[in-house]
Structure formats: C-alpha cells, structure tokens
Amino acid sequence: MVLLAFVSNGNERMRARLVGPVRMACLIFSLVMLTITTGMFFQYFGDVTWMNIAFNDYEFQFTYVWIESLGIHWAVGLDALSFPMIWLTTFLLPVTIIATWNEKQGATYFPLLLMMGGALIGVFVSLDLFMFYVFWELTLIPMFFLILKWGGKDRRYAAQKFFIYTFTASVIMLLGLITLYFLQDPYSLNYSGTMTGRSFSIPELIDNAKASNLGDNWYLGAQMQKILFVMLMIGFLVKLPAVPFHTWLPDAHVQAPTGGSMLLAGVMLKMGAYGMFRLPISLFPHALYHFQLALMIIGMVSLVWGAIVCLGQTNLKKMVAYSSVSHMGVILIGIATMQPMGWAAALFMMFAHGIISPMLFAVCGAFKHHYHSMEIGAMRGMARHSPWLATSMMFAWMASLGLPLLAGFVAEIMMLIALWHMISLDGWSIWWMVGPALVLALTAAYYLWSMQRTIFEGGDAGQPPENMIGKPIPDIANSEKFAMLIMALFTILFGIMPWIGLDMMDDWTKQAFEGLIVFVGKGGA
Amino acid sequence: MSGVKNVEPFAEGFVAALCPELIIFAGLILLIIVPNLGKGTFRIPGTQTRLMWFLGGDRFRVTSNPKLPAWIATITLGAAFVQTILSFQDGVERTAIVTESGTQLMLVNGFSRVFELIFFGALTLAAFASMNRLEVRGVGPRLSTDDLYNNRRQADFYILMLTCGLGMSVVALAQDLFVLFIGLELASFSTYVLVAFYKESKAGTEAGMKYFIVGSVASGVGLYGLSMLYLWAGSLQFDALASQFMIDGTDPLPLIAMGFVLVGFGFKVSAAPFHFAAPDAYAGASSPVAGILATASKAMGIIGLLRMLLIVASPEASEDGTVWLTLLGVLSLVTMTWGNIAALGSTNPKRMLAYSSVAHAGYMLAAITAIGAWNWDDSLAGDGGESAVAVLTALIFHLVVLVAFKLGAFLVLSILESDGDASRLSSLGGLAKREPFLAVAMFIFMISLAGVPPLAGFVSKLLVIMGIVKVAVGQIGAEIIAGGDLGLSDVHWVWWLAFAMVINSAISMYYYLRIGVVMFFDEAEEGRRGPLPAGWQVRFAILACLMATLFMGVASDKLLEICEVAAQSLNYDWN
C-alpha cells in the first residue's frame, strides 16, 4: 500500500496512466481482505464461531515485543466486539472504491483509502494501549489528506478543524492512559517493561481491573477511577461525536469527498463507541454507574439536538451529517441504559449505521457529482430524471429513519426496549421516553420532507437545477449503482436476519455483563 | 566515583578517550592549512634562493576548489560521529581527564558520548547540506578578487562549524564549571559569527548583531554568577560545588549565583523570558545554521542546566523537592505556552520554527522539573533514582531525535531559501507540486514536531510525559492497590505540567498543520513555479533526517538503551 502511494508520486502523465492499475490493485487488495474476514466468519480461516468467547478472551492472538524497555508489544487479537467492526471496515473498503470509481487523481486517492482502512483495522485489532493509540492517531492522517485534497470549497478549514478537535481529545485520552499505566503495581503484569516495570497490555489491565472490581472495590479507588474515566471518555466522545463536541463532524462531512465521508461515517465514528466499550467501560464499570446519568443526558441531547438541527438544514450532506450525530446519540443511550439489551442495541447500531450511513453519503456524493449542488431545494422531481438515484436515495433515507425490516430498525427498537427496561426495572422517570419518541417523529419529518422536496414535486416534467436547464440530466453511473445495490442488499439482509451479527454481539454483551456489571452492585456509585 | 580511569593529558589512553575531539581538531588544522596550499615560495634571507614551501601564492587546482572545505568539514565531523557511535559498541569506558594535581577537568562517559552524538550528527548534516547553500562563483586559481574573497568565505564558514563542534563537545565533557564555560564560549562565539554569516540579507546582519549582544550579556551575567560561586565554594569543580551545596546550599549567595549562571544557560536553550533574541536569530541566519541553533546549541544549554540543577543543586540535597522546583515549574509552563501562542501568530516559517523550539524548551524544562521532584514522595524510599533516570532518558532521547526532524525542517527551508526566500508562509506554497519529496518530508517533520504517532517526535514526547507522570504518581498506585482512595489532589503537582504539555501539543497542532496545508493546497508564489535549485547533498541530508524520524518512531529500542545508559551516567548515585 505504502509502496503504491510512493509510486504514485510520479509526474502527471505517469499518474494518469497509473490510475487504472492502482485502482484495480486497491480493489483487489480490499476484496482479498473482505474474503479473509468473511472467511473468518464462516470458519474457513480458524475454527472460531465468535460465540461463547469469555469476556476479555481473544481469538487469533499474536504478540511480539516491540519496545521492551517500556513494555510495549505488538499485540493483536479479535473478539466478538471487534470482529463485526473489522468485517464492516473490510466490507466498506471495496464498496467505497467502487462507489467513487471515477474520483479524480485516483492514483493517490485509492491508496489513501486503503491506508485509512489499514489504520482502522489496526485500531480494532490492537490489544496494546500504545499500539491502539498509534493506530488511533494514524487514522487522522489519510483522512486529513482526503479532505484537504479532494474536499469541497472550505476543505482547508474543515480539515484543520477535524484534525485539531480529534487530536486535542486524543492527547487528553493519552495522558489518561499514561496515568493509568503508572498507577499499576510495578512488575505485576506479564509483559512489563524492563525500564518502567509496567505494561500496556489491554487484556492484562482488564483482568486486573476485573479482579479488583469484584465485590464493591473500585479498581484504582473511586476518585482516580472517575478521573480516568472522564479523561478517556473525552477522547471517545469527541470521536463519536456527542453534543457538545460534535461541531467538527458536519464541517468535515460536508467538505470531505464522498469516499472519505463514507469511511468517516461508516467506521471512524464507531471507533469512539468501540473505544468506550474496550477501555473505560471494561476497566471502570463503577465509574460508568456513577456517570450513567451524565451519559444518558449527553446521549439524549445528541439525539434530540441532532434531529432538530437536521430539520433546519438546506444542505443535503449537512443534514445527513447531523443525522449521524443523532444516531450516535442512540449508541450513547444504549450504553447508558446499563441493560444487556441496550448494549447489544448500541453494538448493533454501530454496525447498522456503518452500512446505512455510507449509503447516505454515497447518495449525497452522487447527487453532488451529477447536479453540482447540495442544496435540498436545488431540483425537484428527481424521480423523473434519475430514477436510480431517486430510488437509492429513498431506500437509504428509509433505512436511516428506521423502517422495519431494515437494519436500522432493529437497533432502534432494541434501544427503545432497553430504555423501557431501564424505566421499569431501575425506576427511572417515564419522561426519558419523550426524547426518543420525539426524535422518531422528527427523523421521519426531516427525511420525508427532504425527499418530498427533491424527489417528488415539480410537476410531471420535474424541475432540474438551474445550472442544468436545457442539458440532458444524467442518472448515476454503473459503478455507483452497483455499490448502492450492495449496500441496500446488506441493509435488507441485516434487517431481516439480524441474528447473523446480533448473535455474537449479544453474546459479547452477555459475557461482558457477567464479567463486569453483575459484580458491581447497584449501589456502586 | 569508582570505576573511573584517571588519565593525564597526553598520557596513555588520552587519545582513545578524546578521539572524536582530536579528530575535529585535526580537521580544523587541515581546514586552515589546506585552502592555503599553493605554489608559494620562500626566499632565504640574504640569498636569491627561493624554496617552495607550498603556502600562499597561486593555489593548486585542488586546493582552490571552494567545495573542498565543505568536504573536509563534513568528513571530519562524520568521522567524529562514527567514532562516537563505535565507542558505544562495547560499552563506554569511563575516563576522566585530570590535571597533575588530580583535579578532574573532563569526564568521558555515556552521557558525554550521547551528547557528542547529537552535536556531531547535527553538524555533519548541516555542513553537508550547506554545500549547496554558499554560492560558488568560480572555480580555479585565476579569479577576480571578489570571487576569491567569496571562495575564502567557504573555508571560514566550515572552520566556524568545526570550532562550534569542538566547543560543544567540551561542554559535554566538562567536569569543571570553568572548563564548561570555555567550551560554551567557544561554541557561542562560533555561532554568533555563523548567524551573521548570511550577510546577503539585511536580516542576517541584524540577527547576528542581536544574537551577539543578547548572547554576550547572558554570558556576562553567567560569568558573574560563576565568580560568585567561586567566592562561595572556593572551587568550580562540580563535585566540590555539590558537596558545598549540601552544607549551606540555601544561603543567599549560592542561590543568587546559581540564578545568574542559569540565565546564561537559559539563553542557550531559549527558555522564556530569555528567548527574545531566538526568533530574530533563527529568521536571520541561514537555515542550516538556524537548525544547529535549534538542536545542537540547545542540547548544549540543556547540559549546562542539567549539571547545575541536577549535580550541583541536586534533588537529594534538600528535603521535599529542590529549591528551584517551583521556579522551574513556572518557567517551563510560561515557556511552552508563550512559545506556542507566539508561533500561532507568526507567518514566517523560520520564526514559527523558532517559537516551536521555545515551546520544546518548555517541554524539556518540564522534564527537568519532574526530575527535581522525584524524591517528593516519602514512600519512594525504595526508588534509588529510577524515576529520575526514566525522565532523564526521555529528555536525552528527545534531544537526539530532535536533530532528525527539527534540522530536517530547517534544511527543507534552506532549499527554499536558495530558491529566493523562505520568510513567508506563502513561499512554501505549491511545494507539493514543485517537489513532492520535499513536501512529504516537510509534512512528516511537522507532524513529528507536533507529536503524531508513529514518528520519532511522538515517541519522545510520549516518553517525556510518561516520565513526568511516573514521578508525579510515585507510589500512589501501590497505595491505591492497598485500598486507598486517592485522587488527583494526592498526585504531585508536576502532573499538571504533563497536562499542560498535552494541551500545548494540541495548540501547536494548528501551526504545524498550517505548513502542511500551504504546501499541499496553495499555489506557488508568482514566478516560483519552476523546479527548485538542484543539490543532491542537501536532499541526501533531508533523506537521512526523514529516515531517522521514521525509524526512531517505530524502532526506538536500541537508542532508548543508549539514552538510558547516558542518563544513568549523569549521576552514578542513581540507578
């Protein structure tokens, strides 16, 4: 991959000639990765069913000493939490490549997408805090360039804002990680560094934390646990992003090229939620209880605020971006319910949103590409001019607003049930249901309203955008059709048969609850 | 101090111990003589006989080549560098250079060797890259006076580089404050002239003047402090000063004297509030020289600080933290914040790098503060200095890798400077189109300075933060595991310095990224669209920096070991 990026730095003519082969190579490479992960699911590679993996146990483990004196290892492994995310990444890579087949300057664009995918997979597989952080930051660089080079008008501002927001959050997280590192007993872990006597190994940390969280002992003490929890959560909440840290997202999305947006919304946002499950939640369940209300409020505000802002948007892509904020609120609420169902809902939301939102952005990208505008009112009667685009748009919009039998619905209904559970079992106020109920209506409103204004209306002849009056209006290209079709198929697949992915997520949740929460009494806070 | 081999000057073992310095010295003499070799003759007085004595007269074709001094300097410095690396292979033997009466003048150990590595590495790269910088107007024996004069400057430039290297390594070796000051002044005077050497631009002359005046005031203050220290202790030996400090270190006289000495070193590391000359000097000097100021010269200042603060006024000398702890903590906070804020607003890439260098000085001061605090926790009794060594290792590692990406960034600017000018942000515009290699290299240097993994800058910053946190947390972890409920208020306040570093890194991200954005996004300035000036030497140096930046990021284990040895050998009471 890196080699390809270097090769592509030839002169312009060379570059033009390279696009074809490089694109093909990237596609083949990503398809091979997809084959491998799919093979893993069907047990062609490695006999792992992804079920009944005990909490904090990992398959396909591999450990290699990296920096011995600090206790840093190249440690990778998979469990039912990370595997769906990895499959999602490998699934989205070829789809993204196909959907943006005709992107300009492809010889650097496609390798950047691959680098991005590689870094994302790195985040999900790493079992070492140092490695996790390295990959976490590494995802920023290709994304920065994707926005900077292929972005819209204000890409400069958006790229810098994106980088600085997430970087700030993650250095605070880094300080939290280092403090955590030094709070351990020296030489108590297997992979301790020769100089510092501590280890970065995630499984060992979690083991220690679990052992000490047993009963009602707070791992590292109540004060410290709360402080570290907050420091780590800042990193993940900004990435997610949750209100009030979300402002980078609409800018980044609107300016990013389609491929960048697809990966950003599809996988990169999920890094935040993944990180929450992997670190703060697994390490500090007590603090999670303590901050349950705060998380719930942040989640609710994200959910409602995102939806309200969507209503006011005239820019198609910005609307979709804010709908992502709203959906990330669902994940946060799912976590905050502290019900197994809620966590499973959050996990499945990560997955479902990971398939649906790239489709939303692919639609936006195609819209922009063919009509040279993102404004919702720019054209009417699209159904007449571009039936394919109109159909995919309708499908994606419906999937995102949670139409039954599509993947998004499953996650949302699970979240609602979990919320009911929480209200009835833990005695929360019924008013907590108002937010989601309101949002259901709002979501339907903004999606249907925008569809009405773009796809329908405009009379029989439709109303093409002003700059295209008199010209033939094209429909989307074949490659785009193909990509949309695949995403739509999988949305339906996971809507009708959610158990394909849900089973392992549910299993992980169950194991995690047994490992963590059951021991933490309700009076933990 | 056991296990030290005492060697008198020119006795057996002297050459082996001071090999790198002697190489430089030999190179220096060569550099003075060789360009003067010619068909000069000498008339024996009272006769008509003329003897050839090869000095002066029409120069030979080889010796008149203006590139020759550069090659001599590069090869000399490179040889010294290689010699230093080789000396690591089978452990550094501790050798002290003593006078007849047994006073230690210099000490060769892991610490001094690592710093020699920094100095010679930076100077080699800078000398090599400067080959493309100084304009060569003609080659051959028959040139106009102006051209001859210009060629003569080439030799001067590299002679100054070598004296600079010699002075710096003396600083690293010195065991006596006076010897240290001689080395410091030798290096300082060389850098004053080097800064003013870029006389083609007005800024160069101004920078030289400013740097010289402020620098000599700082040295004067330092020297005054030195005399007060001598008055107080009757010796300038570090050992003697340290033992005297144990007795009456909190008297006003030594404290005032130390303060004065620290002003001298503070100027060298460009710590606030002594940093005002730095941006002007960096902006006015030619870029390779500015690179030396930001790396080697800064490392030299750090040596001074370490010796004064950690050996003389050592943390063990006083209970619960040293006397300078709060002062240095505040200085470090001010330095890093000031540097970063000022860098945000500067539109001249060289000034920006200068301010970023101020910010880095702040990070280093934070590390030294943490070392000063390492025995704050009573329960750390079992810690015989491991924490101090950890921080020091990080600090030294930071100085070593800084050479790679800081100097590399200045070298990229150097190419732009020979293209016309590099004093505006827009002069970097379109670099990605003009020469992608340079743009990519510059971007990597920038994000390495900002501390983005997996580059060397990240590892060094991470190590410094880790060291500070380690000291600050102390044995609290053990107490917590024993069931204590402790929060941030129980952690030593140096933890907040780590926090400040983290926030400052985030601030600095903006101006580092801006460079990248300009290179990849903006069009080139009018009339600067063509290819950049050729010169493989400087590009080779940049490539070397780039490789080091990448390599030290992912495979830092070996260098870390060396730095740890160096850190342990600063003070053998810690291990």
Image (spheres, rainbow, N blue to C red):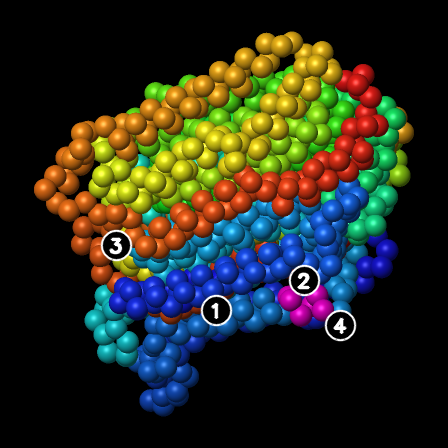
Does the magenta-highlighted stretch encompass residue B86?
yes
Disc 4 is placed on an element classified as loop
* Disc 3 chain ID: B
Amino acid under label 2? Answer: Phe
Which residue matches tag 3? B420
Q: Nearer the viewer, residue A369 or B181?
A: A369
Quadrant holding the C terminus of chain A: top right
- Of tags 3 and 2, which is closer to the observer? 2
* Residue at image coords 45%, 61%: A27
Asked if marks 1 and 3 fall on the same chain, the answer is yes
C-beta proximity under 8 Å, tags 1 and 4: no
Q: Does residue A480 appear left or right of residue A219 in this picture? A: left
Q: Point out which mark residue A45 bears.
A: 2
Q: Which amino acid, by three-letter code, is at mark 4?
A: Glu
Q: Is residue A516 above or below residue A482?
A: above
Q: Residue furthest left?
A: A470
Q: Do marks 1 and 2 share a subunit?
A: no
Asked if the residue at tag 2 contacts the one at tag 3, i.e. Cβ–Cβ closer than 8 Å, the answer is: no
- Assign a secondary structure to mark 2: loop
Q: Report the magenta residues as a range.
A: B84-89
| Rendered image: mark on residue A49 | none
Residue at left 73%, top 55%?
A48
Residue B180 in view, yes or no = no
Q: Numbered disc 4: what chain?
A: B
Marks 1 and 4, how far apart at CA:
29 Å
Residue B116 is a magenta residue: no
Q: In the rendered view, would you say A414 is above or below B227?
A: above
Tell me, for residue B74, which label it has, or none.
1
Q: Residue at x 24, y 78 (%)?
A: B142
Badge 1 amino acid: Thr
